[in-house]
Image (cartoon, rainbow, N blue to C red):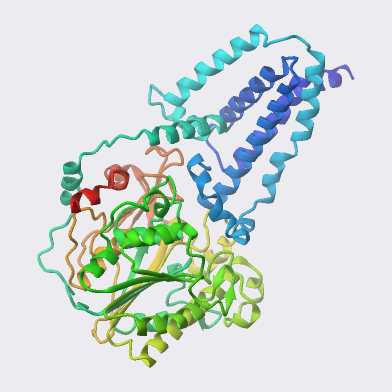
Amino acid sequence: MKRIRNMNKTPYILTIIFAIKMGVYYSLIKVNKLEIVLITLSILMWMVLFRCFSKSGQKKNKIIFMLLYVSFSILMFSDVMYFNYYNDTVSIKQFMQITAVLAVPKSFIATLIPAGFILFLDIPVVYYYFKKEVKKDKCKGVIRNTYILIGCFSVLFTIIISNPFKSVGLEIVRKNEFFMNHINDLYDSITTYNYDSEIEVEEIINIIEEDTDIIKEIRYNGIAKGKNLIVIQLEAFQNFVINKEYNNQEITPNINNLIKNDSIYFDRYFFNVGKGNTSDAEFTSLNSIYPVLDGECYRLYGQNVFKGLPWLLKEEGYSTFAVHGYKKDFWNRADAYPNQGFDMFYAMEELEQDEIIGMGISDKSVYKQLIPILDDVDEPFFAFVISLTSHHPFVLDEQYKTIELLEEDKETKFGNYLETIRYADEAVGQLISDLIENDLYDDTIIALYGDHHGLNYAMQDSNLQIDEFIGRDYDFDEMFRIPLVIHIPGSDITETISTTGGQIDFFPTIANLMGMEIKHPYIMGQDLVNARDGFVAFTSYLGEGSFVFNDIFFEVSREGIFEGSRAWKVATNTEVDYNMYYDEYEKAILRKDISREILRNDIIRDFHE
């Protein structure tokens, strides 16, 4: 009994509580390196905070401590939520995106992990023992031993965070331990605002030129010169549904038909979005510049000068406009689009809200309303259309469902996804028919690509079903793969190109087909029709330094260091030695650094001035 009473003393109980809390936290964010060390350090930090506030007679310290404890618990819960979707812990930079999260509450709820709420269960218990400790010790001020403890812990934190010895073990601790990770993030966020350019403009141009292939014979240059252009960015559209059957039904019969007639289909095409997801897919596709981790480019760099695809077409005499079935200020589009080169933006406020599905106006309604807009604008035109109905969490009313699911797939995320993808495909088919009916089809290029994944590999709530459907283990390479189809009526070109590429390559690829010269050197992608090797660096969902290079997919370690990374062959799951790809790892980091320089210093403005 005496031992039990002793165990009930505050330090022992709290040590156990803090250990359980951190164990749950680290398991939910899938930390499997040095986990015991991380839990020990976190327990020590909690105990230091507890001692600092409990050894003072001031009542306000009780409130301050509990506010801190609750705040840190909320931050841990946010990490778990964020990791479940982005495969990373939340950064202070992403808190600016809270309005975007609140705008899609159903998607937010769908990412909740019930186990994450365990992180709040200890709060009443800790409050009870905190009161007990404060009552027991009435001494004023913080005792000397606590000062020593704080001093020692501060030195330890400083050593680990600065990592002066460049130790891999310390780096793992710095990037994974809860307190150190967020202190380091806070430091990085502060220093970002005091950012000075590290790469000179001339060096940026030289690096880009050195990395550009010299191609003697350029295929398909100008085959679509002077034609209208419609680009459709398909919401959450992954490549594994293309040319595939499910339960003896074509999932995407209309897009499949496009691919078979007068189209170039890129079947090894990857998204490279940042934390702006859909908006970053637009940004990188239109400008051939990589997005950043800090937040969506339309908000951070909306006032920069750009000379991407809309501007290039505008200078060629095109009418340029964007169409989307959601609110015009979402992702800051209304403010950013003029500097992207769009003359008009037809958003939810300008369109007839006759059919609402999920977040906004249905794809079929938006495409129907696109036709009179095309009839009204001067030709040639460039219409950039962002679809919406297949947005996560993939919920359709019964009247819109046209694919028959197997019993085991009904009411599952995988089944729901297939239903919305079928709807998105039907909408594309309807648009093609309407273009033909209104004599707009023959002289119009139609390009379609997915903006990002629909089914998240890291969330694992549908992976087994996808494994069975694709015939192998679902992994990041399949999650990141999206279709790109460029349909050129009357061209007699029907080709599948398997050169590895991504959204970063869209602008130069379209520019080649339309016979246009890009008038500045800050292009991070390449024309995929004529490229010999393919390379795409990734920004979000995987750490910086991750890339796909030809048939090799490289995932950097979660600490963002080369050691402990992994590499495998695309579409086979065959592991390869990651040590063979250090040069490409450095290349991925350099490309991202160059893009940051271009954006942070508004370099394209200086080029045109």
Q: Position of residue 321 (x, y in %)?
A: 36, 71
In the image, 234 versus 159, the foreground residue is 234
Residue 373 higher or lower than 437, as above or below: above
Answer yes or no: is residue 403 visible. yes
Q: Which of the 4 image quarters holds residue 307?
A: bottom left
* Residue at x 39%, y 92% (from the top left corner): 437
* Residue at x 53%, y 72% (from the top left corner): 389
Q: Position of residue 79 (x, y in %)?
A: 58, 43
Q: Position of residue 26 (x, y in %)?
A: 60, 38
The image shows a total of numbered marks equal to 0
User: Which part of the image, by quadrant, shows the N terminus?
Assistant: top right
In the image, 96 versus 545, the foreground residue is 96
Q: Position of residue 357 (x, y in %)?
A: 59, 74
In the image, 566 versus 129, the foreground residue is 129
* Residue at x 75%, y 35% (from the top left corner): 122
Q: Which of the 4 image quarters holds residue 132?
A: top right
Residue 588 higher or lower than 402, as above or below: above
- Report the side of 283 relative to 469 (left or right): left
